[in-house]
Image (cartoon, rainbow, N blue to C red):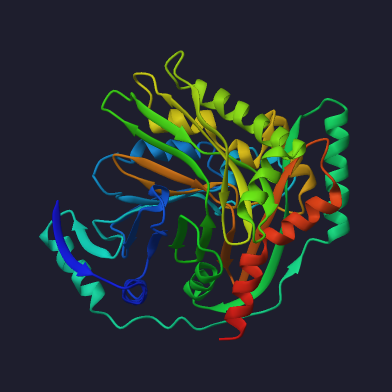
Amino acid sequence: MVVEHLGTWSDTQWVEAIRRLAAAGGLAWLDGDGTTELGAQSYAGAAPVETRVRRWADPDPLGALEEIEMRGEVPRWIGYIAYDAAWSGRAERARWPRPDDEPVLRFARYDALLVRRGDRVRIVADDRQALARMRAHLDRAPISTKARAGLAQATRRDAHADAIARIRRHIEAGDIYQANLARHWVAAYDGAPLALFLAMRRASPVPLGVFIDAGDHAVCARTMERFLRWEPDDDGQGRLETRPIKGTLGRRSDDDADAARLRSDEKERAEHTMIVDLMRNDLGKVAEVGTVEVVRALHVEPYARLHHLVSTVACRTRRGINLRDVLEATFPPGSVTGAPKVRAVELIEALEPGPRGIYCGCVGHIGRVVDLAVAIRTAVVRQGQVRYFAGGGLVWASDPEREVAETELKARVFLDALAAVRGG
């Protein structure tokens, strides 16, 4: 490993460097906001040296994880696992058709990364040649971040409210306890996807931002939810952690009063507790017996417009466990599916107005440490369109009008960013 320190940079300088890397193609940017340890560092790379891709028609997309070597003090592989990977190879059971060549897993390996912690920036590369290539990328002219965007069209409010009512009937019948249901937004989009991500970045400061240029599509995610962090030793033993978010309240001026109101809301607490139990069960599939624990429960975290309830669940993985085992036990994330998970996933497919794609899958990096975030607040730009999703967890006590309003609150980051793009 070769390291070159570049000194202290302002955020303006950092973004300028990102635009230069984007000119090399294949940009991957893990955008930590630096305010907490969750997003303490940012990473950016371009022109990946290899990729692993699995598509909708592949019956075993998670098999690609066995081809990815977990090594390196900084991440080497950056990418995503789409929510649709949960349906991959099971087209006969899915309501919505997907193109056979649609990617459901994509990770790219970078032999050099730009790394930022606080205001200090360095290059971390595999060797001198990789370092020189990164230097050459930083000498490029930055790409234009101009774009044009249309007005977004959303799933009708009454259609979403009707789907919520149907979920409540399934809960009443004892079919499920909870399900997460989302609305879709779509708009015309032409130009640099990075323009949208930068606008979302301004609209929504969060610990975990992710931008991925995958060539024929781009992923713009602003998430605060850690799906998995795993730091195994050579035998597969190590700490595995998840931080499910479930429970939302619009943020007002008095954060203490908001936090107390959210913690005391019976519907939000019930929703959250079910998902914590689900995640304990999922981690238990790969954990050493007796090591699954709730490390921190019902913590209220404030963000730009919202408060969320967050808990931390952790365990120690058993000897012989690998990354594929971990994902098979836990994917898709419980906080964006429901309980029981298998039935909730079936109902989501039946009641949402189209396939989720990448939304509600996971995004992040694989190295010696695996760190993956839930792909919420996520827009995907592809073929002249941008799609965005926002949803929430539903229990018997859910009020349809309140739930519809919550989706619109969560969509503000996207709608404000689109407006900023239209305004130049």
Give the quadrant of residue 22.
bottom left
Measured from the top left, where is residue 238 in percent x and y?
34, 27
| Vertical comparison of 123 with 109: above or below | below
In the image, 184 versus 89, the foreground residue is: 184
Residue at the extreme left: 128
Q: Is residue 12 visible?
A: yes
Q: As drawn, which residue projects farthest toward the top? A: 289
* Residue toward you, 379 or 198: 198
Q: Is residue 147 left or right of residue 52?
A: right
Q: Residue at x 19, y 71 (%)?
A: 135
Vertical position of residue 328 compared to residue 12: above or below: above
Q: Position of residue 318 (x, y in %)?
A: 38, 19
Is 395 in front, or is 248? 248
Residue 37 in the figure: left or right of residue 293? left
Residue 387 falls in image quadrant = bottom right
What residue is rendered at 23% in x and 44% in y? 72
What percent of the width, then of the height, locates residue 198? 48, 72
Q: Is residue 62 left or right of residue 346?
A: left
Q: Foreground residue, 257 or 30?
A: 257
Query: Could one spot residue 89 in this view of the protein?
Result: no
Residue at left offset 50%, top offset 84%: 146
Q: Quadrant of the C terminus?
A: bottom right
Figure disc tally:
0
Q: Position of residue 82 (x, y in %)?
A: 55, 48
Q: Is residue 379 above or below residue 169?
A: below
Left or right: residue 7 compared with residue 190: left
Q: Which residue is rendered at x = 78% and y = 57% of the image?
A: 405
